[in-house]
Amino acid sequence: MKSNKTIIIVVLVILISIACLVVWTMVKNVEYRRMIKETDLQIQKAETQQKARLQEAEAQEKARLQKFREAQQKAQVQFQKVREAQEKARLQEAEAQRKSRLQEAEATELQEKNAKLQEQIKGPTSFVPFTGEETALTMVEAYPEKYIGKTFIVIGGIAVSDYYNWRYENAKGTHISFKFDELRPDKSRTGKNMSLYVKREISKNLVEEITKAVDTGYRSKLIRVKASILGNRYDPDCPGILAELIDWQFLSSDKKGWQDWASRKRR
């Protein structure tokens, strides 16, 4: 009997221990789950806070970039205005200089014309008749673009040449080349010259007259020419004057005037 009671007691103790262990395990599981839930909540809260901080930082960065772009655009606008003002000032200065040069050239031309007229008035020393329609080569040299497509009249000595260059480089088959030296009323050279080109089909009489003058001992033939700078022959980099010879006149027999233009004689 006593042995059975002992066994029962041992069994009861074991069962109670097992029950206590089960209860303790259940309590621990509940506590563990609560801790996991709290941890999850803390993680979610931390993630929410981190996301909020990132969004705030991104918004601040966007605002900073926007301000930078606006400042940059404003600086570019101001820089453009400064450049436009500088360019305008440069163009105004260039225009003023161009007008000044033009005025100087016109004044020089007027002085030369007056000097030529005065020399003509003197009589005995006036060897070349000037009409006042002539243009000084100084003007053509200073502003060649002004004479593109426009005729100008010059008096001087002309001689056959073999100079074919710039936009006339390949014109030997279609044109005759001439060297022209500008003269004053007393036949002295002004120091200004140009290259003239005339179409071969109308050059025969001119070449013959020049040849006659050279054969009699002259370096060139006195002539009054009507010339023009052609647009398709003009090169702004060319250092000299290259022009198309449109028409010409020789001295009259009395040496006091000029014959008809060559173009009228060909009609």
Image (cartoon, rainbow, N blue to C red):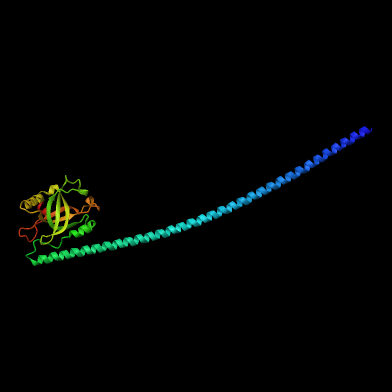
* Outermost residue toward the right in this view: 1
Q: Nearer the viewer, residue 205 or 83?
A: 83
| Screen quadrant of the N terminus | top right
Q: Nearer the viewer, residue 252 or 60?
A: 60
> Residue at 12% across / 52% down in the picture?
159
Count of number-bearing discs: 0
Position of 18 with respect to 165 (left or right) is right
- In this view, 131 is above or below 43: below
Residue at 21 percent of width and 63 percent of height:
106
- Residue 177 location in percent, x, y? 15, 49
Q: Residue at x 42, y 58 (%)?
A: 77
* Residue 232 x %, y %: 23, 50
Q: Position of residue 243 (x, y in %)?
A: 18, 53
Task: From the viewer's side, name the closer residue of 5 and 72.
Answer: 5
Left or right of 76: which side holds 256? left
The x and y percentages for residue 135 are 17, 60
